[in-house]
C-alpha cells in the first residue's frame, strides 16, 4: 500500500527576548536536544526559532519551546535534563498535555534563590500524597527524589509551624558488626550512615542554622534503634533506607506515630542489605498498609529519576538484565 506523502511544515516561534537565551541554552544546546528527540530541524536567530519538518513534529517541537519558555519565565534554570523531560511530556497525540509548570507548582522551600519543586509526575503525586496523608510510603530507584522531597516537605511543615520538630532516621544495617570497629564515639560511628540526611538539610536551611536546630532538639537525626519505646507527637518523621528494616522494625517504627505527626517512609527494594533469607520490612509494609485510609504508597520508576539522564537508562538496563537472569533460572 502506497504511503501518503509527508506533510512538511515550517513555522517560526518568537520567544520572549528575556528568556530566549535560557531556552536555547549554551551554544543552542537545548535546541539540539529537542532536535535529537523530535523529528524537526530548529534554527535560531536572536529570539526567533524556525522549525521545519513533518507538521505533527513541528507542532510538538513548538509546544516544547513554549513549555520551556513558561518555565524560564518562572525562574527555572533550563538545563539539558529539564529539556529532555519537557520533550518526554509532550505527546503529539495528546494536545492537552501535563506540563512541567503544573508538575512543578509552587516551591516547597527556597534558599538563596534556589527552589525545591517536583520534577516529574511521580514526584508531583508523591508531594501531593504527603500533603493529604498521614503516612506515606515512597518506593523506587535511586535518584527519584524520595528522601530529598520528603526532607523538603518536613522543612516546609516546620517553617509553617505545622509541626514542632523534624525526626530523620535510618537503619544502620550497612554497618553491620563493623560498627564497633570504627573509631570515635557512637555518634561519630553512626554519622556516615546519616550523612545523606544532613546533606539534604544543608541544601534547604542555612548551614549555620542546622547545628543549632539539632542542638535544641528541633531536628533529630538518629538511627532507627533510637525510636524504640517512644511516641512521636507533633513531628514530621522520615524513615530513610527502609528496605533495610525487618518487618518487626518497621512495625515498631510505624507504631511510634503520635498526635499531630506525619510519617514518610522511603526505600529502594533493589538495594536491600539484609541477610539473603531476611524479608524486607518495606516489602511487608507495602502489602499490609495497602487500602488503609490515611496511608498512601507511591511507586517511582526510572522516568522519575532526576539525576543525570543516563541514570534512568542505567536503571532500566539493570532491570532488564535482572529480569532476564530470573527468566534463565526459571
Image: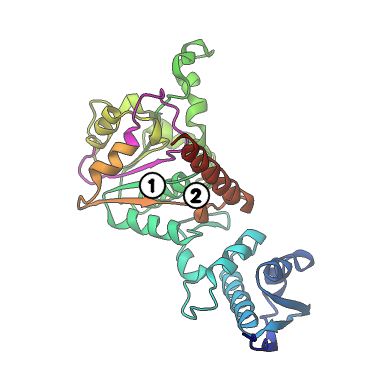
> What is the magenta range?
257-282
Is the C terminus in the top left, top right, bottom left or bottom right quadrant? top left
Q: Nearer the viewer, residue 4 or 264?
A: 4
Taking 314 as reference, is 226 left or right?
left
In the rendered image, residue 202, in percent from the top left (x then y), is placed at: 53, 42
Label 1 CA crowd tier, 10 Å (few <14, some 14–19, many 20+): many
Query: In the image, which disc is placed on residue 144?
Result: 2
Magenta residues, dominant SS class = loop
Rendered position, 160 above or below 318: below
Colouring mode (rainbow / by chain / secondary structure / one colour): rainbow
Residue at point 28%, 57% (across, down): 132
Residue 264 occupies which quadrant of the picture? top left
* SS assignment at label 1: strand
Residue at point 39%, 35% (across, down): 243
The residue pinned by badge 1 equals 138
Is the N terminus in the top left, top right, bottom left or bottom right quadrant? bottom right
Alpha-carbon span between mark 2 and mark 1: 10 Å
Q: How many marks?
A: 2
Taking 196 as reference, is 136 left or right?
left
Observer able to see residue 206 = no
Question: Do the numbered discs 2 and 1 sit on residues whose CB atoms are within 8 Å?
Answer: yes
Q: Nearer the viewer, residue 26 or 141?
A: 141
In the rendered image, residue 101, in percent from the top left (x then y), is placed at: 50, 70
Taking 134 as reference, is 319 left or right?
right
Which of the two discs, 2 and 1, labels the residue nearer the N terminus? 1
In the rendered image, residue 81, in percent from the top left (x then y), is placed at: 63, 59
In reply to whether residue 279 is colored magenta, the answer given is: yes
Amino acid at each position: 500500500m502506497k504511503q501518503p506523502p509527508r506533510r512538511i511544515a515550517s513555522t517560526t516561534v518568537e520567544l520572549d527576548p528575556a528568556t530566549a537565551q535560557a531556552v536555547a541554552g549554551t551554544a543552542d544546546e537545548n535546541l539540539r536536544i529537542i532536535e535529537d528527540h523530535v523529528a524537526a530541524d530548529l534554527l535560531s536567530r536572536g529570539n526567533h526559532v524556525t522549525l521545519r519538518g513533518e507538521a505533527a513534529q513541528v507542532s510538538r517541537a513548538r509546544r516544547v519551546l513554549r513549555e520551556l519558555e513558561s518555565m524560564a519565565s518562572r525562574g527555572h534554570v533550563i538545563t539539558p535534563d529539564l529539556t529532555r523531560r519537557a520533550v518526554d511530556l509532550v505527546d503529539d497525540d495528546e494536545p492537552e498535555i501535563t506540563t512541567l509548570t503544573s508538575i512543578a507548582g509552587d516551591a516547597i522551600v527556597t534558599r538563596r534563590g534556589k527552589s525545591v519543586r517536583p520534577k516529574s509526575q511521580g514526584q508531583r503525586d508523591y508531594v501531593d500524597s504527603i500533603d493529604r496523608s498521614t503516612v506515606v510510603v515512597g518506593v523506587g530507584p535511586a535518584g527519584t527524589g524520595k528522601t530529598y522531597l520528603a526532607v523538603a516537605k518536613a522543612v516546609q511543615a516546620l517553617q509553617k509551624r505545622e509541626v514542632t520538630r523534624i525526626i530523620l532516621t535510618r537503619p544502620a544495617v550497612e554497618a553491620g558488626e563493623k560498627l564497633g570497629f570504627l573509631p570515635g564515639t557512637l555518634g561519630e560511628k553512626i554519622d556516615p550512615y546519616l550523612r545523606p540526611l544532613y546533606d539534604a538539610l544543608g541544601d534547604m536551611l542555612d548551614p549555620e542554622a542546622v547545628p543549632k536546630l539539632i542542638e535544641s532538639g528541633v531536628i533529630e537525626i538518629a538511627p532507627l534503634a533510637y525510636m524504640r519505646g517512644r511516641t512521636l507527637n507533633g513531628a514530621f518523621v522520615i524513615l530513610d533506607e527502609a528496605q533495610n528494616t525487618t518487618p518487626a522494625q518497621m512495625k515498631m517504627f510505624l507504631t511510634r506515630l503520635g498526635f499531630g505527626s506525619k510519617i514518610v517512609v522511603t526505600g529502594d527494594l533493589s538495594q536491600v542489605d539484609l541477610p539473603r533469607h531476611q524479608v524486607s520490612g518495606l516489602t511487608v509494609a507495602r502489602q499490609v498498609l495497602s487500602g488503609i485510609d490515611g496511608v498512601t504508597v507511591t511507586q517511582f520508576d526510572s522516568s522519575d529519576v532526576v539525576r543525570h539522564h543516563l541514570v534512568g537508562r542505567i536503571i532500566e538496563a539493570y532491570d532488564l538484565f535482572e529480569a532476564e537472569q530470573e527468566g534463565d533460572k526459571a
